[in-house]
């Protein structure tokens, strides 16, 4: 058997872990602009360590298009 205090601590840890996993999954989901850029053949990709910074190649143009994903 576990005490009420231990039970509450475990529940708190589980809620924290679930919220962390949700945030991680959301940050890895592709933004609509990235999906559209891929459909248009612009070969989008990450621009640096930030998961929200991206670039896309415009055919026949230089330099690549870059941007920052915004949360709605």
Image: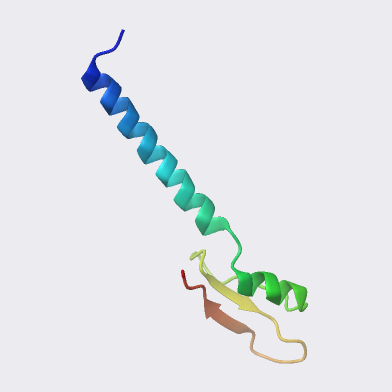
Identified at 51% across, 55% down, the residue is: 26
Query: 44 above or below 63?
Result: above
Locate the N terminus and report the quarter of the image it occupies. top left
In front: 12, or 69? Answer: 12
Whether residue 45 is visible, yes or no, is no
Place of residue 18 in the rendered image (x, y in percent of width and height, measured from the top left)? 43, 40
Identified at 33% across, 29% down, the residue is: 11
In front: 57, or 33? Answer: 33
Tell me if 40 is positioned left or right of 69 in this view: right
The residue sitting at the left extreme is: 5
Identified at 48% across, 66% down, the residue is: 50
The residue sitting at the top extreme is: 1
Tell me if 20 is positioned left or right of 25 in this view: left
Identified at 51% across, 68% down, the residue is: 52
Place of residue 46 in the rendered image (x, y in percent of width and height, measured from the top left)? 59, 68
Place of residue 68 in the rendered image (x, y in percent of width and height, measured from the top left)? 50, 76
Query: 71 above or below 65?
Result: above
Whether residue 30 is visible, yes or no, is yes
Query: 28 above or below 59?
Result: above
Query: 28 above or below 1?
Result: below
């Amino acid at each position: 058997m576990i005490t009420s205090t231990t039970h509450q601590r475990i529940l708190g840890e589980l809620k924290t872990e679930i919220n962390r996993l949700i945030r991680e999954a959301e940050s890895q989901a592709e933004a609509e602009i990235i999906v559209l850029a891929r459909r248009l053949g612009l070969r989008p990709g990450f621009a640096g360590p930030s998961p929200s910074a991206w670039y896309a190649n415009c055919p026949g143009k230089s330099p690549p298009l870059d941007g920052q994903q915004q949360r709605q």
